[in-house]
Amino acid sequence: MSGIYRADLLAGKNAFLAGATSGINLAIARRFAELGAKVFIISRSQDKIDAAVAALGGDAAGQVADVRDYEAVENAVAACEAAHGPIDIVVSGAAGNFLAPAAELSSKGFRTVIDIDLVGSFNVLRAAYPHLRRPGAAALTISALQSFMPARQQVHACAAKAGIDQMMRCLALEWGPQGIRVNSIAPGPIGDTEGMARLTPTPEAQERLTATIPLRRYGESSDIADLAVYLCSEAGRNVTGALMVSDGGQTVGGSAIEMGQ
Ligand code: NAP
Ligand code: COA
């Protein structure tokens, strides 16, 4: 527990999180649960759901659903409401990524990442919409620096994340009058994740990347979990349509993202 927030800050809140069986999204689910929320998680693997639910403990529950499959997501959101009641917080963080030069990336490879990240995020927020408590619900998408900084070998992720953030702003406009807030977090490189290990597989690559970060540190998944609590709790009550960047200052000077390759 970080101790930054009051221990019962999210008591009575019901959170649905997509892609929360590992990495950043699992860290968000863990922090929400520590602060008293009931969490319901989805991902593609029953084994990963079982392990994450056991690790989260308490009232945590979960169900297999691929975010590309709207019906499966709808079923999972309905199961979440049946288990825990109306949804106060929805987090859409499932993603797929790999390094591939644009000239070597197949159309299917490009579409796969768009389907998981962008269409999947729409599916999660759209399916959750009828179940959201209003006024008062908060929705959060998980973006990346690729949303606004072009990056080599990342045409698919850059396009998908830019789409997510513009979608987030549109939903903030349309759903704001009902008291539903919609925001996005763009994490910089997060050291304690497999996603990061995939993009910077060698110590040399990691060293080169660290040298481009003003704070000279990789972020940690707990940095993003604490920011998610801010955005999804009463603390963020007047914040909607915002893209919150947590990157150690990597993009503050406008330098290109380098994955260390
Ligand atoms: P991760 O550990 O690879 O976790 C990805 C999660 O999404 C897993 O729970 C995975 O579980 C699930 N998932 C993948 N495809 C799915 C699908 N089609 N349907 C449902 N669930 C799916 O990822 P991470 O590195 O923590 O990244 C989490 C988020 O942060 C992503 O949106 C990523 O783009 C963003 N981000 C990460 C970094 C970083 O440095 N790690 C930096 C910037 C942004 P299953 O395999 O069981 O489906
Ligand atoms: N380079 C180029 N193309 C690649 C690739 C790579 N490293 N990995 C996958 N692709 C292409 C495949 O070749 C395929 O296209 P093709 O049939 O034209 O060759 C297409 O992407 C779909 O691949 P497939 O493996 O069938 O997709 P999937 O749905 O099983 O898996 C991925 C999706 C590829 C994104 C997979 O990496 C994944 O499941 N990732 C989830 C975890 C993750 O990436 N986390 C990081 C979050 S930032």
Image (cartoon, rainbow, N blue to C red):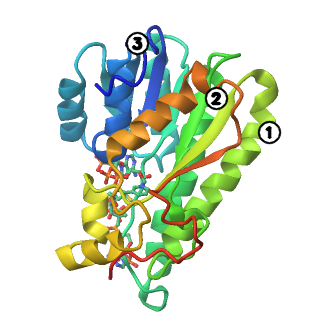
Query: In the image shown, does 194 or 192 lie closer to the viewer?
Result: 192
Mark 1: few/some/many CA within 10 Å (<14, 14-19, 20+): some
Contact flag, marks 3 and 1 (Cβ < 8 Å):
no
Mark 3 or mark 1: whose residue is earlier in sequence:
3
Q: Quadrant of residue 215?
A: bottom left
Which residue is at 25% across, 52% downward? 192
Q: CA distance from mark 2 to mark 1?
A: 14 Å
132 relative to 19 in the view: left or right: right
Which residue is at 50% across, 58% downward? 144
Looking at the rendered structure, the secondary structure element under dot 1 is helix
Above or below, 55 relative to 112:
above
Mark 2 or mark 1: whose residue is earlier in sequence:
2
Using the image, tell me which numbered label, if any, was put on residue 173.
1
Name the residue tied to disc 3: 83
Using the image, tell me which numbered label, if any, was put on residue 129.
2
Q: CA distance from mark 3 to mark 2?
A: 17 Å
Above or below, 64 relative to 3:
below
Q: Position of residue 121 (x, y in %)?
A: 55, 47
Query: In the image shown, does 216 or 172 lie closer to the viewer?
Result: 216
For badge 1, the amino acid type reads Leu
Q: Nearer the viewer, mark 3 or mark 1?
A: 1
Q: Quadrant of the N terminus?
A: top left
Q: Position of residue 36 (x, y in %)?
A: 38, 13
Q: Position of residue 46 (x, y in %)?
A: 23, 38
Looking at the rendered structure, the secondary structure element under dot 2 is helix
161 relative to 169 in the view: left or right: left
